[in-house]
Image (cartoon, coloured by chain):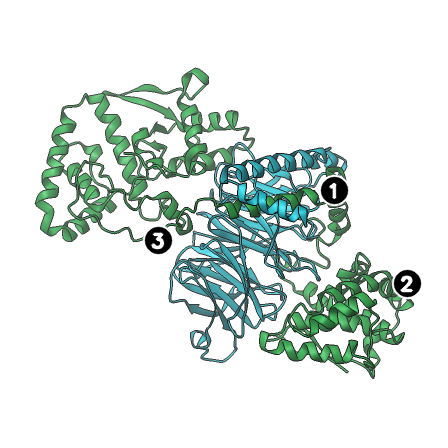
Chain colours: A green, B cyan
């Protein structure tokens, strides 16, 4: 009985590849029987055949990549080396065989230890040298014998029954089936040190398993008591779409249809322009100067950035957009001091105060809203900002029910004003231009300003960039 | 007045079927409208852009210390410290430059799938199968007992899949297997806003990089990526082109677009102004899911970690793969570029984290 809730993206692609690989009508790998000393090795293909096939059919240019992919296909259990428990792919004459679809991972196998015990027990009953247990298998068997001491007779009997069934099969068929069975266990009980590819991401588990389903046994053994899956999680109840859901969808869709969107050509130009502007700041593309600390083991780059003297490159970035100035604490500081020198800093200080308001814990919000009102908006305010009457009205209403977004509209309005006015003046100012051209003029920061004082705390608890503006 | 009464009358006559077909026809109309604006492909316009040179990206640091699968990591703003969390419940803070472990705490649950560093560098947040997001202040006391200072902030009804501080230590945004995202006040633990709309587990989220923005994007098992207004709780935009779970979403540095990584083995770029998928990053030979994605500083490169243990580096504009990085010995589960873009960190089910530059 197959698991019905398999996520198709999980196994679909890999199984499609494995199927194509075996299909000789469409240029699959050459699967053949190889003569060896006294016997024949049925149904094998070489590692290099697989590697070649992958490179040809999946457009892989690099052998290493093909070997890596092939090894993963092996690790998942779709193809296996006939003479090794370790499921990896080698690009040479090593022989591999394909796994029977019955044993594919998409069948949601979760074989119990009783099955594994039956398998190992069965192996000890067979007299062939090639079927001798490996050291780790012998250890596993010993451990299982201790764990299942009480029902070992039952396990032994099952193993005997399996041996009987196997003996009835054709010799060649047995060779193939034995190896496929062994490969199945190599996936579900891997060699110590190998990746267990059956491990699942717990977030995806409950959609893969049907908790009601009885776990099937490899050897048809029915368990008296099914152990509860250790990963039992309640699955989301599937809600049927209601009228209300559809109404919401319709409202949403209408909103989207009304939305003014840009043409792809415009969007492409914009994305390209952005990367081109910032490419010189991207250490992966333009090597960092003086060096990338991770590569050179020298933190000079970071020391320079922490200093109060911004590089020309850093100052240039402030000119890209007002957000860049506001984002960089040194830039922000320079911008503020420039405006102070012109006695026009109230807009920026209001903007910063509102940003700060949004960072406050809930319990402090009401107080801060009031403080901001008093300083910037109340009649006769010390740092009165200039809002149009509409925004002012709206804000006065908002203040009656104070919250983190009380000043959102006002802030947006002031932001636009600053962008076209204060920011533009800052970029034209000699203060900024001097920094940009790295003229040896002392920075504003060195002059003590009677207005706002910035306090920097030292790392590690507070980063030097965290500047707390004490409001005047 | 008359039209309102008429509309209400119509509402009575709406059946489930008629609403469904109206929604379907609107979807068709929307697709038509969007298609009109699709005059060219990004990679076509990008043909004029200079090709990238050969990259030499190597593992520069390997962080060993977790006893089980590494599930999540986040950078500190200081560009060198990181926090990482694991399946065995351990959360570790490292100075990844020296590889020294600076703090460690063991959560009471396994599968700690989410962790985040506070903007101040003074705290971390984490959670997972406990359905909560907890905040731990970081101190430099000699015998620090992190667990004692733990503060439970978020409470969901299913596993916590992702968490992120906003631009302040005082608010945390969370995503959960219960299908919702939520914004919380750290100090009081109060729910400030919840975000409903995903039809299944939400697996990831990312906050828009703007100084003024109040939006974030989330991705889920319903194959949808949704953009939200943090103030109103409303979904502003929605994208559904992946064929399977979206494991990771990350904004393009300008904030005008975002990338996603999915179990369908592709990564995609969605532009918010075009309201559309504008690029898909895939190869025939990439058949395992992409678990986590992040952009380089300029947005030209997209780093993506996959369940096939590799990291693929994509040219975002041209759509081609520029590099494949081997090294991890099991799935790559988490990947973030450092705050100044000088490196990126990957975490894996092989118990290690690697810094690449």
Q: CA distance from mark 1 to mark 2?
A: 32 Å
The chain under label 1 reads A
Give the label on residue A262, or none: 1
From this viewpoint, is residue A465 visible? no
Q: Please tell me which of labels 1 and 3 falls first in the chain.
A: 3
Front-lying residue, A451 or B7? B7
| Residue that label 2 marks | A428
The residue tagged with tag 3: helix, strand or loop? Answer: loop
Camera-nearest residue between B14 and B194: B14
Q: Are marks 1 and 2 in contact (CB under 8 Å)?
A: no
Between label 3 and label 2, give the one nearer the viewer: 3
Q: In the rendering, at what x and y percent does residue B154 appear? A: 48, 66
Q: Residue furthest front?
A: B2
| Inter-mark Cα distance, 1 to 3 | 44 Å
Is A268 placed above or below A414 here? Answer: above
Name the residue rendered at 38%, 67% in the picture. B108
Callout 1: SS: loop
**The N terminus of chain A, quarter of image:** top left
Q: Give the number of the disc on residue A233.
A: 3
Residue sitting farthest toward the top: A25
Q: Residue at x 78, y 73 (%)?
A: A349
Pinpoint residue B177: horizontal percent, then vertical percent: 45, 54
Left or right: where A323 falls relative to B129: right
Label 2 SS: helix
């Amino acid at each position: 009985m197959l698991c019905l809730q398999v996520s198709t993206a999980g196994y679909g692609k890999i199984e499609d590849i494995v199927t194509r690989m075996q299909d000789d009508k469409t240029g699959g790998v050459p699967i053949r029987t190889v003569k060896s000393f006294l016997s024949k090795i049925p149904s094998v293909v070489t590692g290099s055949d697989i590697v070649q096939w992958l490179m040809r059919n999946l457009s892989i240019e690099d052998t290493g990549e093909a070997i890596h992919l092939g090894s993963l296909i092996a690790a998942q259990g779709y193809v296996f080396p006939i003479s090794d428990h370790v499921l990896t792919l080698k690009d040479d004459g090593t022989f591999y065989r394909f796994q029977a679809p019955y044993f594919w991972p998409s069948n949601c196998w979760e074989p119990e230890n009783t099955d594994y015990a039956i398998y190992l027990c069965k192996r000890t009953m067979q007299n062939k040298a090639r079927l001798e247990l490996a050291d780790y298998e012998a250890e596993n068997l010993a451990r299982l014998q201790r764990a299942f001491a009480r029902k070992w007779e039952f396990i032994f009997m099952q193993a005997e029954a399996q041996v009987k069934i196997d003996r009835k099969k054709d010799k060649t068929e047995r060779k193939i089936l034995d190896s496929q069975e062994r490969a199945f266990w190599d996936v579900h009980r891997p060699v110590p040190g190998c990746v267990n590819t059956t491990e699942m991401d717990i977030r995806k588990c409950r959609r893969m398993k049907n908790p009601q389903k009885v776990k099937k046994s490899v050897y048809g053994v029915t368990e008296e008591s099914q152990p509860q899956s250790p990963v039992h999680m309640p699955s989301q109840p599937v809600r049927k779409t209601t009228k209300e859901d559809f109404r919401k969808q319709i409202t949403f869709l209408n909103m989207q249809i009304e939305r003014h969107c840009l043409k792809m050509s415009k969007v492409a130009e914009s994305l390209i322009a952005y990367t081109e502007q910032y490419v010189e700041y991207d250490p992966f593309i333009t090597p960092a100067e003086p060096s990338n600390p991770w590569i050179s083991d020298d933190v000079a780059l970071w020391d320079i950035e922490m200093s109060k003297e911004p590089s020309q490159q850093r100052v240039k970035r402030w000119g890209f957009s007002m957000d860049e100035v506001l984002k960089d604490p040194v830039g922000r500081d320079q911008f503020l001091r420039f405006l102070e020198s012109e006695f026009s800093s109230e807009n920026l200080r209001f903007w910063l105060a509102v940003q700060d308001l949004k960072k406050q814990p809930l319990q402090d919000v009401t107080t801060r809203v009031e403080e901001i009102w008093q300083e910037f908006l109340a009649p006769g305010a010390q740092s009165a900002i200039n809002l149009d009457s509409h925004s002012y009205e709206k804000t006065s209403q908002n203040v009656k029910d104070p919250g983190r977004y009380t000043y959102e509209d006002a802030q947006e309005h002031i932001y636009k004003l600053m962008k076209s006015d204060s920011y533009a003046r800052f970029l034209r100012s000699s203060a900024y231009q001097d920094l940009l051209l790295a003229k040896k003029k002392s920075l504003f920061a060195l002059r003590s300003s009677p207005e706002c004082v910035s306090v920097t705390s030292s790392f590690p608890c507070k980063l030097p960039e965290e500047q707390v503006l004490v409001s005047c | 007045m008359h039209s309102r009464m008429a509309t209400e009358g119509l509402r009575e006559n709406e059946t489930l079927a008629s609403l469904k077909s109206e929604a379907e026809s609107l979807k068709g109309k929307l697709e038509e409208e969007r298609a009109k604006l699709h005059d060219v492909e990004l990679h076509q316009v990008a043909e004029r852009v200079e090709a990238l040179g050969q990259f030499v990206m190597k593992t520069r640091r390997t962080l060993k210390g977790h006893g089980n699968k590494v599930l999540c990591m986040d950078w500190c703003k200081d560009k060198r410290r990181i926090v990482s969390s694991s399946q065995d419940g351990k959360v570790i803070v490292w100075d990844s430059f020296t590889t020294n472990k600076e703090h460690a705490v063991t959560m009471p649950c396994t599968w700690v799938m989410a962790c985040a560093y506070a903007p101040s560098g003074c705290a971390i947040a984490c959670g997972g199968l406990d359905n909560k997001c907890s905040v731990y202040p970081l101190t430099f006391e000699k015998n620090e007992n992190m667990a004692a200072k733990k503060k439970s902030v978020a409470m969901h009804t299913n596993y916590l899949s992702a968490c992120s501080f906003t631009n302040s230590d005082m608010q945390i945004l969370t995503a959960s297997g219960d299908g919702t995202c939520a914004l919380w006040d750290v100090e009081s633990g109060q729910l400030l806003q919840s975000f409903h709309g995903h039809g299944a587990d939400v697996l990831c989220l990312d906050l828009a990089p703007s100084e003024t923005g109040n939006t974030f994007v989330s991705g889920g098992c319903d194959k949808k990526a949704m953009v939200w207004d943090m103030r109103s709780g409303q979904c502003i935009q929605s994208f559904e082109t992946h064929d399977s779970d979206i494991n990771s979403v990350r904004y393009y540095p300008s904030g005008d677009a975002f990338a996603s990584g999915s179990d369908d083995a592709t990564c995609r770029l969605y532009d918010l102004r075009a309201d559309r998928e504008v690029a898909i990053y895939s190869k025939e030979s990439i058949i395992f899911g992409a678990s986590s994605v992040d952009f380089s500083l300029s947005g030209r490169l997209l780093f993506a970690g996959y369940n096939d243990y590799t990291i693929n580096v994509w040219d975002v504009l041209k759509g081609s793969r520029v590099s494949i990085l081997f090294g991890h010995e099991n799935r790559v589960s988490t990947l973030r570029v450092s705050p100044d873009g000088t490196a990126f960190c990957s975490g894996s089910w092989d118990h290690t984290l690697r810094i690449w530059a």
